[in-house]
Amino acid sequence: MSEPTPVLTSPGHAAEESKFQLFVQVAMILAVITGIEIITVYLPFSYAVLFTVLVAFSAVKFLLVIFIFMHLRWDRPLCTIIFFIGLVLGGGTMWALLTLFGADASKPLTAMAEVARTVLAG
Amino acid sequence: MSNAATGAIDHHFDPTTSTGIPNKKLLMWMFLASDCMFFGCLISTHLIYRLHPPPGTPSAKSVFSIELTSFSTFILLMSSLMMALAVNSIQKGNLKTLRSSLLTTILFGSIFLGCQVFEFNNFVFEKHLTITNSILGTTFFTLTGTHGCHVAVGVFWLTLMYVRSFQPKDTTADRSWFVRNLVHIVACLGTILLGMMLVLKLVRSLQGAPSFGAGVGLWLKDYWIALIGIAVTGTLMRILARPSGAVAFDEHNAIDVEMMGLYWHFVDIVWIVIFTAVYLLEYI
């Protein structure tokens, strides 16, 4: 028995067509954001402003890819939960390490020696 | 209208599992979650050493090339689009579009890898930044090299999936299919590697030559054997991409393509983070 021929005007077909358009639109948005990111680094604003803007752009790109390209938007919530467990653990580890090693007490001895030399010379 | 009524497969629900998610997909999401932690540690290590660079560490800004990295980022984003289209087409049972989308994704992945090889060569031989001579080199090459390995694995997986789409339905009637697919894989990989090598050598020749014509002439003289090689592997690919009968690859295999797609998109999102954290932050 032959497979049923898909009807071009079916709701499923329309949904797939719109998904195709959505993917292309998302890719264009990602490309534009990347372009803006590159321009942003040359703008004469403070480090804090530029840092925040770049991290925000990066987060938007990240979320667009995982929810649209990786289908998390249409998938069961368990997939999102599993991925975010790994993401939160990885991100939390990053934050903890950067906070620990960013503290003054964590400065390596080589850096401290440099500071001491500068103070003594001054 | 229900899926049973339309005869379509619901790619986001599997009634045979207790979670409603196909087991393969669940496995891939768990792997990606663990890979998040893996890359989180690598990125942290790089950033921590950037916080306190030891004396003598070269400035990352003087080493990096924002133009090349931006180009490779754009290419990887477009490869993600092609991968999404490949998944979309196999879910509709459109084999022809699947194959062309997979081949484009392979091409974009290879261009990204080529850019990385060019960048690493430039860093080592011109900027004298190696994996052992500074902390910046160690953390940078470990992080971006690991990501590059992920991309290379992805390109290999894509190649296997592309060749898999030619497997005949009746393997007992066509006993040579295994050898034919094996030759097909070798031809695809040969074309990718030779193509990458030829483009990189052409760029090098053009950089070192006084004029465009002289560079191309030198390149043709040195790499004519590789050009014949790529012509042979490319022709083999074209010949083997003509299945004689029905193939055992349709929308029921969509879950395999989707799983591979998840991996490929993950490689893309890791690069999104690396591009900002490792490259762009050095410029502000």
Image: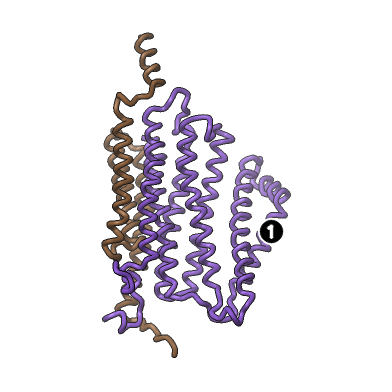
Chain colours: A brown, B purple
Quadrant hosting residue A6: bottom left
Extreme top residue here? A121
Q: Residue at x 46, y 47 (%)?
A: B147
Residue name at image x 39 percent, y 59 percent: B28
Where is residue B189? Give x, y as percent.
59, 59
Q: Nearer the viewer, residue B110 or A101?
A: A101
The residue under the point 35% across, 82% down is: B7
Q: Which residue is mark 1?
A: B229
Q: Is residue B68 visible?
A: no
How far from the left and from the top, in percent, is residue B198?
Answer: 63, 52
Identify which amino acid the numbered label 1 is placed on: Gly
- Residue B157, x across and y down, in percent: 51, 60
Residue B59 or residue B253, whichever sits in front: B253
| Subunit bearing disc 1 | B
Q: SS of the residue at dot 1?
A: helix
Q: Residue at x 59, y 52 (%)?
A: B196
Left or right of B18 on screen, residue B168: right
State the residue in front, B218 or B213. Answer: B218
